[in-house]
Amino acid sequence: MAQWCANVGVDMQIYFIAALLSLQVELHVHLDGAIRIKTIIEVAKWREITLPAGSEDEMKDLCKMHEPGTLTEFLGKFNHYMHAIAGDREAIKRIAYEFVETKAKEGVIYVEARYSPHLLANKGVDPLHWNQKPGDITPDDVVDLVNQGFKEGEKAFKTKVRSILCCLSHMPNWSMDVVELCKKYSKDGVVGIDLAGDESMDCVSYPGHKRAFEEAVRSEVHRTVHAGEVGHAGVVREAVEVLKAERIGHGYHTLEDQALYKQLLQQNMHFEMCPISSRLTGACDPDFTKHPLITFMKDKANYSLNTDDPTIFDSTLNSDYQVVQKYMDFTEEEFKRLNINAAKSCFLPAEEKEELLEQLSKAYGMLKSTGF
Ligand SMILES: *[C@@H]1O[C@H](CO)[C@@H](O)[C@H](O)[C@H]1NC(C)=O
Ligand SMILES: *[C@@H]1O[C@H](CO)[C@@H](O)[C@H](O)[C@H]1NC(C)=O
Ligand SMILES: [Zn+2]
């Protein structure tokens, strides 16, 4: 299985699917896990910031997960480069702009990118991450800068992009800030709130997060929560019942509680699935042919396919599509169905969602009345 990526590129049938599905929707990708290594190196040079490796190849090698590891190991990868980007206006704008370019090249027409404004700021954040020097960029400035980059990118590359702002599980005292930013920018690029971080700490229902998500419900801010990735099904239940999540990030371990799984199928809960990520973070069995996603697919669950952190998994959305086609027998119909479900479950306002669905239906050559 370690060789899974070696021969996917030469499979003709896969090319066919990739070409067919040049219009995709992605709902779960971290902006700070999707930065070009080349950009990290250039920014570090101009800011005179030291990186743990000199060349692009060495840096790439250091930042990527080679073999299935743990979520903690994965989270450690950010320590190699976030200090180069965080706290710099040009760098923050640039990674946002380049993100749109990357997604446009992958054939994504609509993407929801997520990030923690606090992790890219260097003012008004306690404690500061990445051993940065304090500066003058607040989390609010970060959202503004990312918005600028996204807007310029959208204009240049035609891929529509919106943001989800992340609370971090181990920083419950940032969460109220995060929901306030979601409210402030709700007409300007931000469509939802997320809870990310190390789920194994069991902090989904910490009062800080709970209060923030209650405020999100009150203010009609859309909600997604990382749950059931490495954590148990109980975390998924808490995400739905306590935090009122409308979508679940990952959710693989929901299957361990069949009653909950059935209930969520009935409720049409949307699951943001990230196959390559789940293998490399050790969230799932490294053998793709035993992946929980196969069950979700067979049960016609409501889910999308996503990259999560392409820099660290050295992947593209197309590699995730190739994996499920090669190892999980995904059909063309299923690719269409899951993208339509992604569009239906996105956090855009109703009218824009309708437009997106129309674009997809047209592209997939089907009438809107076919029951998708
Ligand atoms: C927020 O929580 C962190 C970690 O528990 C702590 O170090 C910091 O002092 C707290 N900040 C505030 C403003 O309470
Ligand atoms: C997925 O969720 C969306 C949004 O609630 C809904 O419109 C769609 O019908 C759902 N799909 C399935 C297969 O449940
Ligand atoms: Zn994630």
Image: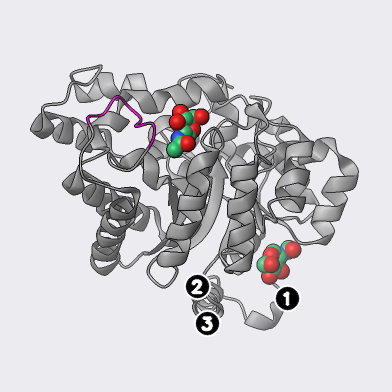
Q: Is residue 156 left or right of residue 70?
A: left
Q: Secondary structure at mark 1?
A: loop
Q: Which residue is mark 3?
A: 351
Q: Which residue is mark 2?
A: 363
* Count of numbered labels shown in the rendering: 3
Mark 3 Cα shell of 10 Å, populated few (<14), some (14-19), many (≥20):
few
Q: Say what amino acid the circle numbered 2 marks.
A: Ala
Q: Nearer the viewer, residue 339 or 40?
A: 40
Q: Say what amino acid the circle numbered 1 marks.
A: Gly
Q: Which residues are magenta?
A: 126-133
Location of the N terminus by quadrant is: top right
Q: Secondary structure at mark 2?
A: helix
Residue at the extreme right of the image, as rendered: 259
Residue 4 in view, yes or no: yes
Location of the C terminus by quadrant is: bottom right
Q: CA distance from mark 3 to mark 2?
A: 19 Å
| Foreground tag (1 vs 3) | 3
Q: CA distance from mark 1 to mark 3?
A: 19 Å
Instruction: Give the answer, above or below, for where 5 lies relative to 17.
Output: above
Q: Nearer the viewer, residue 86 or 217?
A: 217
Q: Which residue is mark 1?
A: 371
The quarter of the displayed image where residue 286 is located: top right
